Amino acid sequence: MNEKFNKLFETVKFPNGATVKNRFVMAPMVVNGSSYEGNVGEDDIKYFERRSDSASLLITGATSVTPDGNAFGYGLGLYDDSQVDDWKKLVAAMKSKGNKAIVQIYHPGYQAKFTYKDKGVVYAPSNLNLPFIPYPITAMSKEQVEETIEQFVQATRRAVEAGFDGIEIHGANHYLIQQFFSKTSNTRIDEYGGRIENRAKFALEIVKRVKKYVKENAKNNFIVGYRLSPEEIHNEDVGYLLDDSLYLINEVVRLGVDYIHTSLWGKRAYASKAVLGQCKGQSINKVIKSVIDGRALLIGAGDITSADKILEASEYVDLLALASLIIIDPDTKNKISAGKENEITLDVENKIEDLALPKNFPPIVVAMEGNGSIPQKTLDLLRKMK
């Protein structure tokens, strides 16, 4: 192995004492391998078996805590006890090479487009009519808010029973937790809306109650992570700034999460700079790492699509979440460790069968376009896969 990559293979320790063998993380990616109801499918198991040695920490794609949270058609669910046995099979596949398995739990809120198709209603913090959502959005009652918080706790219980090493609370990508934090999508006038402390309450109640369950029922080194989008800015529409996220991050870390995971998009997204506010022009991940100040680890993702970018990203974050690269070349980590980093590829021609991608994967390809680094030929071949 080229010695410049040595630090990528150092053991990393979480605040709770859990350790991973290297700095590689398999980023959470929806791949449409489950049943329509969100039950683990054979496609999910084969997909993770193929990537079981791709990183020291493997994170599932977004997994719904509610049966009313179908955003993708064939995304995962962990909302019913009957699902746990199949999850045990998936956990076994993820951990088959001695690596750790994390399940990312979420509620899509107004993005549950398949739920709207089936039931004619989706819920969010407030009644909304958004130009990019082609259906009406209904405000959650306080009772529904409380029920949803409990659904996160119950999903955590099932994750423990299934044998996961941890959970990641998904507060990013415009899903329900982010919708509560955003001034754009949260216009409530109760204790969950208005000033930043109120808009953060939904997220913090989830973290607090999940941590309580874990402390009382899980092994001592069970990992709890939190993912967020550090900014929500769409032209003149500002849901929140990095300045606001720093408040939330500090509170989440104070509650004892083991890592923060930033969700960023675009070329060299791991090096993105804040667009507005007091942190304008500063590296988002470096600012967040400074605020965390060693109390939790920082995982970063976003256009980590080559050996050189992996190395560069390691200057910004503690752990490196590979997304498109692990889909296209699951052997990236092992190629680097064997001194064959020049063989890492973004080309899938004549290789798709080896990638063990679910049959319903093609609609997900659009999510791989955001960084601009994946060749168009690769995107086209993935869309056309049988």
Image (cartoon, rainbow, N blue to C red):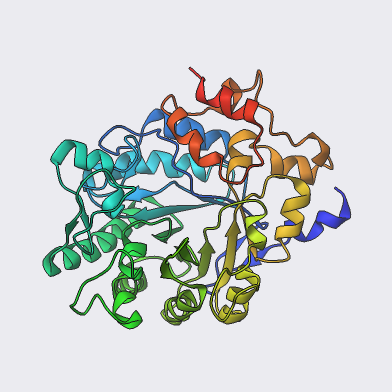
**Residue 337 location, x and y as percent?**
78, 46
**Would you say residue 14 is visible in this rendering?**
no
Numbered-mark total: 0
Residue appearing at x 46%, y 28% in the figure: 362
**Would you say residue 107 is visible in this rendering?**
yes
Residue appearing at x 27%, y 46% in the figure: 112
306 left or right of 245? right
Q: Residue furthest front?
A: 236
Q: Is residue 386 above or below residue 383?
A: above
Q: Nearer the viewer, residue 69 or 279?
A: 279
Q: Nearer the viewer, residue 237 or 201?
A: 237
**Residue 297 location, x and y as percent?**
58, 70
Residue appearing at x 52%, y 58% in the figure: 263
**Residue 212 location, x and y as percent?**
32, 74
Q: Is residue 143 above or below residue 339?
A: below
158 left or right of 221? left
Q: Nearer the viewer, residue 97 or 327?
A: 327
**Residue 237 location, x and y as percent?**
41, 64
Residue appearing at x 36%, y 32% in the figure: 41
* Quarter residue 183 falls in: bottom left
* Quarter residue 35 falls in: top left
329 left or right of 142? right
Q: Residue furthest right?
A: 3
